[in-house]
Amino acid sequence: MFDRRAFLLSSTAALLTGAAAAARPRLVTTQQQTVRGASAPIEIVDDEWGTPHIRAASIPDAFFGQGYVVARDRLFQIDLSHRRELGRLAEAFGARFARHDANARLFHYRGDIDAELRRVPADVLACAKAYIAGINARIDELIADPSLLPLEYRILQIVPIRWDLRDLVRAREAASGNVDDEVRRAQLAAIGMLDLDAVIAPLRPAWKMQVPEGLDAAAVSPSDLGVLNIEGLPWAELTGQDPAAASVERANAGSNAWTVSPSRTATGRPILANDPHLGIGGFSPRHIAHLTAPGLDLIGGGAPGLPGIMQGHTDRFAFGRTNFHIDQGDLFILELDPADPERYRHDGGWKRFDKIEEAIAVKGGAPAKVTLRYSVQGPVISWNPEKRRATALATIAMQPGGDGAFAMIAINLAKDWKGLRKAFELHPSPTNFHYADVDGNTGWQVIGFAPVRKKGDGLLPVPGDGRYDWTGMRKYESLPSEYNPAKGWFASANQNNLPADWPRDRIPAFSFRDPYRYERIADVLKTQDKHTLADSVALQHDTLSTPARQFLALLPAAPSAAAKPAVDMLRAWDARIDRDSGAAALFEMTWRDLGKRMLAAIVPTRAKGLIPSIAPSLLLELLARPDARLGTDPAAARDAMLDSALASAWASAREKLGPDPAAWRYGTLHQVRLRHPLSAIPAIARAFPAIEGEGSGGDGYTVMARWLGSSSWQVGGGASYLQVIDVGAWDNSLMLMLPGQSIDPRSPHYRDQYANWANGRMQPMPFSRTAVDARAASRTTLRPA
């Protein structure tokens, strides 16, 4: 059971212990490096947790320092990602990666890169250039002295590639959005079962789907996804990773954030909390840095390889973000000209594809030559002359202005809410942006770009003959916002937060998540008139499960002998998914088993392969109010299913956790295990030991969201970075990151936050010069060459 009082006391004790440690004399190491690209000396003060506090004489130099320290701590991570995005895997790993390179290059921006750069304000562009120069400065150091290279380079016999500003504009992620959902819906429509899609993905807000005029739904198949098919994604051949893991992450990825106004906090200052949820199991998706220069004081978690800070605070305001789920991708079905398959039907005639020939460098072999095609809608992801059929993917990222590489810099340079609203014009990705400033103001703004369609709602594939083309993009001004809300708090947890009276013709998405996390956050915040930092920390680690609580109310009154032990254990449970709870483990086993049984019962044979899972809200609804989908006697069928699932879960728990139920622990199943993404290579696995040994509570529906893996019980994702910001009293703020700042096993920061993360022990977030210096462990001065 999660003991909130004990948790708060332990967190406070940890902070006091840290304060005592800070008071003791600390050995601070010093060094100097000569670098190219900086305009003046830069001091980097690394604290005891490995957070670099960068002190520069100019704002661009501060971003130079960020690029340098990201490359210092995470070079192989950003280099591998950069290679993938640029389509340069085959030159390092061989011919079997040429097709992956071709796929990446298909999603390179083919418009005017210089025009894209001209869209970026000069001060933002200067910071981006400096960030890249900082990465390259670290790479230059390592190339000059190969003994300093991270271990991966020696094992794989490769060298890091240098970065270029234009590549930030050129490389666009092949984000497919919901196009796999579009294909599934078309297949269901073809067998007259489109309404069955609500079993797996209920639309929020409610909406009546229709087959687009002119779409032959029966002809749509997964092959139309072409290069987006999950089997074709990069890394599967190299890493041996479960290909289903990517789809599980897409289904669960989200975040929590809440902002509490001064009127509802104990200090009279705003509090902003945020914990982004991403995949857990490989490299950490965040790197913490503190950038200081005249006119800039900024700290928080950034995405390695992307300039700027994504969640954190300046000396004026705190900011956080969660995913808003704008539908930013559509699948277009193209009819090919039977006389010339390089042409497709469009606007009443035949239009020729734009074609680009690429030569992909291949290690140990001749260059691989590929042809990339583009229609007016976007990249052609499938081209089949035999069937006279092709498909194209329209995405916001491929549109002019659709690149978000500079957005965080613009946000970081803003001074207030008004300045942020100008910065949002550079931010295409869908986000709930949270804000709180030193003057006591709080704000929420949905940002991101939404396509303007000639017709259609983006829920099914559409004909590519011109009738459904995009005509432009709506920017953040057309999306919801609040400033200083009267209730004194607001929260986002990927739920449908469109206002009830939102115009039906401007609904940007229908794929919002189940509201369980948000409802729990709201239940807590609306009862706390004097909210504290400790309250926010406790809420970030809250494990109360709404689905579990609703399920407990449905336990059978007269279970069978086989199910009775399970019922007895669950009846005494508090519905918290705590790692030390045996009942939590039993519930998760029952829940997974019950979902499979319900799915088998309600999905007709013809649709079995199209519906892989059931939405938790529907599962609970059918358990509470069984209907004709369960047969002629729905209540009896429900009772039998529930009893069987309970009995089966009890047997499974005994098998996996042992014969003594008193010794069962959810954390025994729900392990936190992190491995190098290339650990399928034996030499990598030997050099980079797995970070493991801790269990965790939580699942995909608790505020402490730590969802289960695709085919296992271990942690598949969740909040690897957490922050709780005391706005204005910045040194009181807290943060945590899994597993540490460095990905080098020789570093003391390889896993130094792993146990703290697993146990919910937040660390201080020192910000003032005095607080940082008290925690200093090393000082590095970068001097311009």
Image: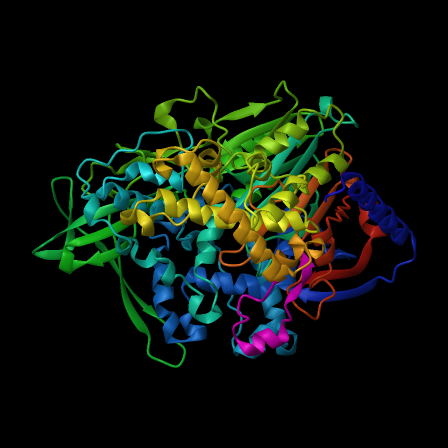
- Whole-percent x, y for residue 306 in the image: 55, 52
Q: Tell whether position 551 is magenta.
A: no
- Whole-percent x, y for residue 604 in the image: 30, 45
Q: Residue at x 31, y 30 (%)?
A: 208
The quarter in which the N terminus is drawn is: top right
Q: Tell whether position 692 is magenta.
A: yes
Which quadrant of the figure has residue 395?
A: top left
Q: Is residue 25 visible?
A: yes
- Whole-percent x, y for residue 591 in the image: 53, 46
Taking 498 as reference, is 633 left or right?
left
Furthest residue in direction right, as rendered? 24
The one of 437 and 608 positioned closer to us in this rendering: 608
Residue bounds of the magenta highlight: 674-695
> How does the figure colour the protein chain or chains?
rainbow
- Whole-percent x, y for residue 609 in the image: 33, 52
The one of 704 and 301 positioned closer to us in this rendering: 704
Q: Residue at x 71, y 51 (%)?
A: 580
Furthest residue in direction bottom, as rendered? 364
Which quadrant of the figure has residue 674?
A: bottom right
